[in-house]
Image (cartoon, rainbow, N blue to C red):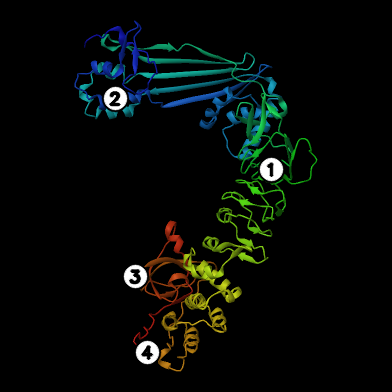
Amino acid sequence: MEKYPACELFIYHGEDKYGSCDYLTSDAGQTTVLYDFFYMHSSGGVDYDILGSWLQRIFEGKSSESSIVVKLNNGQALRYEPSEKSLKMLDSLVSQPLTLGLISDICNPYTMPQKRREFIDSMRASIPTIETVTSIVYSSTVTSSFDESDIAKIGKSDIAEKLSDITVLRFLRAALVEKTEKVFDFAANTLTTTSVTTISAMEDPSAGKYAHIEIEYKKPTEKVKEIVGIAAADYVDLQYKAAGKTGCTCTKCLSDFEVIQVPDEIDGLKVTGIGDGCFEKLANVKKIILPCSVKSIGKGAFAGCKKLVAVVYADNPGSKDDFKICEKGKLVALFTTKTSFVIPDDVSEIGKNAFSNCNKLKELVLRSGMKRLLNDSLAECKSLKTINLSGNLDEINVVAFEKGGIKEVILPNGASVAIHDKFMFGCFAYTPEGMTFSYQQVGEKLSLAGSESVRYKIAMDLIDNHLNELSDSVLSSVLGFAMKHAIGGGDVETLSKLFELETPAKIDFTDMVKQANRCGNSEIVAMVLAKSGQGGDSKKTVIRHETPAEALTGWNKLYIKVRFENNKAYSYFSKFKVKEGDKVFVPGKMAGMPGEVIEILKDSPSGRAAMYTLEVTEAFNVVLEEVDDNLDL
């Protein structure tokens, strides 16, 4: 076997990893491309792409270890094992003052609020004040090497025969260790980075020297001055980001005191804003005092703060008023613990997400001073359900109602509109008298509702409360739909109520009679035939002789798949003991259409199938008698 030159004792530079510019440097200072070097010591003819995929393995981290050590001025060193997320936070040390909150965010491997609070409390017990921290040392070691399974795979590959013994012994038995240490020295206000790469390889197996030798390469030590400052102890748990040249926005508060006071300035930057979710899920805070320079509050800044009762400015810390930020007549942000809030007369516009921090707000009253309600004005206020338009507003974008999840709109005349489906928002309009709502349009657009059950709910609301506002044709359509739904669901009481209504509506009973006959309920059949004027003809009725299936005991549910006459199959649950081949009836879009049980399911349907999981209303153990469709109904 040929003896190879000294340049085989290589050192990995670590630059441009895995590319065609991976470099090895010999102890004599010679440099060669890694792929060519490996290729030279094979028997030749090895495809570079195939070979490269194996060469990369030696530089892929197989094991890693990292730690963060916080050193104190009393000589104590606190060691933490950071998570992957925590390591990314290290970069923030060079961009903002060090606080106990920032240290806890870097060192804490947990993300759950309760775990974070416990960690911060334990850190405070170990670190009395931020000024006691002298430095933070981050260390990382990544070890890369081929393991036996990798070598076995190469042995079975097409390139195995083209690799020489020296290749296997020297390169596939090598190991790469990369060590990095960063020292954040707060006394000297510097960041020092040191990197060492060590390769362990056989000395020269071709000469019978099998001892492993280590070749070390040290990158020049990097030192950066004036990286961070030490933050004052009175706001140790606030993180921030710059906002402009002189201001900043608080992004995260890790303190959980009963009273939290945000400072006027952080590291010379004036606090001008509170970011999204800044105080989110603080369990103990009751009051938050903000500097008067704060002009914006992000959405959900106080979300989950169940004990919070007051947000105030520093110039009036004892204020009992609702906290609001206004700018030239525009309401930017509001915090209130009330369930109902009246917009002041001097507010003419509501900004984006203005109510996102009002966790208890259920009703909003808009006065005549209001001029504009934007698309996202009500967004992110999860509890808000009612909008009261007591004033005659000049402009309201109804999209805001939909985005805010509004369920009730009170019109200027005091009438209440219950919103059962988002299509109803399209039925609002402006007139010289102000905003109005058209139930006629609701009836005309009923088919746009999201589901059969919602359509039925809206139809019954129209019938119970707004008959006089519907034209005869719309009333006929709505009544017909409600009657068919009641027939399909076997709801004798509701059907009787609908039949007793005195209206000018003209109902076509042709399809209804067929549906009633097919539903298998003799009482409903008799009612429909009587209402249609055909009850005297006994041939039109169907007397059932089927035996209802026995009900299941307790809360047991039987999950089944049912195929209907239109050949569509859906999943349902039944409270009856049924078997394949039995007939069943269900509410909804298949109402009145008998279905056949084609499968007994082992478990509850999941995913899309669960959307069709409704309850079987009736089940029978025998096939129903078919109705003669040729009868003159």
Discs 3, 2 touching: Cβ within 8 Å: no
Residue 404, above or below 7: below
Quarter of the image with the N terminus is top left
In-front residue for pair 411/145: 411
* Front of the two marks 4 and 2: 4
- Which residue matches tag 2? 52
* Front of the two marks 3 and 2: 3
Other residues around mark 3 within 10 Å, as few (<14) / some (14–19) / many (≥20): few
In-front residue for pair 625/575: 625
Dot 2: what SS? helix
Q: CA distance from mark 3 to mark 1?
A: 61 Å
Residue 273, above or below 399: above
Q: Residue furthest top?
A: 28
What residue sits 46% from the left and 91% below the top? 535
Q: Identify which amino acid the numbered label 3 is placed on.
A: Asn
Quarter occupied by residue 270: top right
Is residue 603 shown to the viewer in this render? no
- Which residue matches tag 1? 326
Counting residues from the N terminus, which is met first, the one under dot 4 or under dot 1? Answer: 1
Q: Identify which amino acid the numbered label 1 is placed on.
A: Cys
The percent coordinates of residue 95 (x first, y second) are 58, 24
Instruction: Say which mark, if any, is on residue 632.
Output: 4
Dot 3: what SS? loop
Counting residues from the N terminus, which is met first, the one under dot 3 or under dot 1? Answer: 1
Counting residues from the N terminus, which is met first, the one under dot 3 or under dot 2? Answer: 2
Instruction: Say which mark, if any, is on residue 567.
Output: 3
